[in-house]
Image: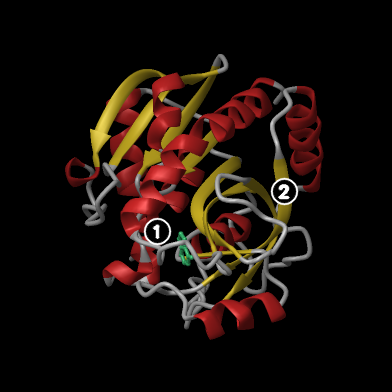
Amino acid sequence: MMMDKLKETAAFLKEKTGFNPAIGIVLGSGLGGLVDEIDIKHRLPYKEIPNFLASTVEGHAGQLIFGELSGKQVMAMQGRFHYYEGYPMEKVTFPIRVMRLMGVHTLFVSNAAGGLNPAFEVGDLMIIRDHINMFPENPLRGPNIDELGTRFPEMSETYCRELIGKAKQIAIKNKIKFQSGVYIGSPGPTLETPAEYKMFRILGADSTGMSTVPEVIVARHAGMRVFGISVITNLSEPSEMDKPTTHEEVQNVAGAAASKMTQLFKELIREM
Ligand code: HPA
């Protein structure tokens, strides 16, 4: 039973950490730098946590961090589970549900993403206004877990408008350049062909990546507020001189832009 496993993991983490955090954070590829700002009390590698799986991707350290950020208790995933690694959706989204059981009601998500909007530049932050699910399945498929949420979750305000508004004010005040737009999540692990990037743009998206959407769906199902950021690591229409996107490039650009995202998250959490 899914619910039993979730309760087992949440009980283990509560016992181990004594934490009851209201804020959860998911750090994407190369975006782990935020962890340096956390006053860390506990660091738990995924492989030591019951019912978690080890993350297999380079640049994803794979640990759960418990500590204080801007004076508030947070739990942060340094590295996430991706669908392309072969995990079923219930494993990809398991930690989010554990967060909910730990007491988390606001989730901060981040990802490294390709920029589809021609106005975007490499290194830009994009505040996620909405998303499109291009994964071949929905993480809520199957029997509904009534204890967590409703069968047919409402998705008209998936990304909290109030938090988006606050984030924009903070960015302006601190002179952090930002974009905002729609993230389209697809399974990967291939990056897009030029024709696929063009299709995603036509569908109405501004950024694209291989994560986030499953976690956000599960978070909304469980009634959490969500705030998300894409760090634009590459562009769908590179200039003639640019080389094709590599995972290494994604990591490097993400690392450099992570400090702006960190500042934004920190200030938002301070104001909560
Ligand atoms: N496509 C998909 N995922 C990505 C990209 C991209 O261009 N860049 C970083 N993650």
In this rendering, is residue 9 above or below 201?
above
Mark 1 residue type: Met
Name which quarter of the figure residue 262 lies in.
top right
Where disc 1 sits, the SS reads helix
> In the depicted view, which residue is nearer to us: 111 or 119?
119
Residue 19 vertical position relative to residue 208 in the rendered view, above or below? above
> At label 2, which amino acid type do we have?
Gln
* Among the two numbered marks 1 and 2 on one chain, the one whose residue lies closer to the N terminus: 1
52 lies above or below 154: above
The spot of residue 126 in percent (x, y) is 65, 49
Using the image, tell me which numbered label, if any, was put on residue 179: 2
Task: Give how far across and how far down residue 95 sits, in percent.
Answer: 39, 50
The residue at 28%/28% (across/down) is: 43
Which of the image's four quarters has the C terminus?
Answer: top right
Residue at 46% from the left image edge and 61% from the top image edge: 242
Q: Position of residue 254 (x, y in %)?
A: 45, 44
Q: Which mark is residue 3?
A: 1
Say if disc 2 is inside 8 Å of ligand 1: no
